């Protein structure tokens, strides 16, 4: 193989890697005040409703890339977590799910009436976080209770070495700020309150 051919191959590999990195992007879906549904790669306006966010091109979102044990558990007992912004117990809940490599849907019950009502139906109160594993719900943050529910559903106790935790599918609001930026105390405005 000549130098020119080798240089072309290296260039092609570099271009493919750059395209793959560029393909990993957030895609948002939301409804505007007139009921029109929008899709885009930029975060929606603050007054948007029914917001969902997905990371496209991320291998963490591909269920077939997850350990078999996790795939079976998520098929039989999908995980949903109801949260609010600036909620220290919610941050602790996210950390547990991340440490265990649990794929989950995160529903923001703060400022989203439909999600707040769903929390009230599940638990009888508008307090978060709430864990839903299959049809079993756990109200409030209690690491041992959450771990027991995940164990019973068959989720691994820890993320396998060399694996990255999957990003959650977010519904009803934007991604939370990094844990360091979120205040440790305080009650968020809106319908759902931290528990």
Image: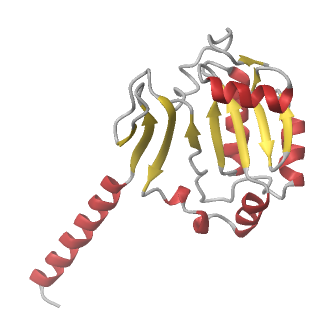
Q: Is residue 91 above or below residue 97?
A: above
Q: Quadrant of residue 69?
A: bottom right
Whole-percent x and y of residue 20? Answer: 34, 61
Taking the spot 65% from the left edge, 59% from the top edge, the residue there is 161
Given residues 184 and 32, the one toward you in this image is 32
Q: Is residue 107 above or below residue 16?
A: above
Q: Quadrant of residue 74?
A: bottom right
Whole-percent x and y of residue 23? Answer: 34, 56
Whole-percent x and y of residue 98? Answer: 66, 44
Pick the quarter of the image with the C terminus. Answer: top right
Taking the spot 39% from the left edge, 30% from the top edge, the residue there is 44
Position of 42 with respect to 55 (left or right) is: left
Taking the spot 64% from the left edge, 44% from the top edge, the residue there is 105
Can residue 91 be seen by looking at this rendering? no
Pick the quarter of the image with the N terminus. Answer: bottom left
Which residue ends up furthest to the front in the rendered image?
34
Q: Is residue 172 above or below residue 4?
A: above
Given residues 158 and 111, the one toward you in this image is 111
Whole-percent x and y of residue 7? Answer: 15, 76
């Amino acid at each position: 193989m000549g130098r020119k051919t080798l240089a072309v191959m290296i260039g092609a590999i570099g271009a493919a890697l750059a395209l793959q990195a560029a393909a990993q992007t957030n895609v948002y879906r939301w409804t505007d005040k007139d009921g029109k549904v929008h899709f885009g790669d930029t975060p929606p306006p603050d007054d948007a409703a029914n917001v969902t966010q997905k990371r496209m091109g991320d291998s963490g979102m591909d269920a077939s890339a997850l350990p078999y044990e996790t795939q079976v558990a998520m098929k039989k007992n999908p995980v949903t977590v109801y949260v609010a912004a600036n909620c220290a117990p919610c941050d602790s809940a996210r950390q547990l799910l991340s440490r265990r490599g649990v794929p989950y849907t995160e529903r923001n019950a703060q400022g989203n009436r439909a999600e707040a009502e769903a929390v009230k139906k599940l638990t009888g109160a508008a307090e978060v976080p709430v864990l839903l594993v299959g049809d079993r719900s756990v109200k409030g943050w209690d690491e041992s209770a959450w771990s027991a529910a995940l164990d019973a559903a068959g989720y691994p106790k820890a993320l396998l070495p060399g694996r990255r935790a999957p990003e959650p599918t977010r519904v009803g609001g934007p991604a939370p700020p990094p844990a360091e930026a979120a205040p440790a105390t305080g009650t968020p405005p809106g319908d759902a309150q931290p528990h």
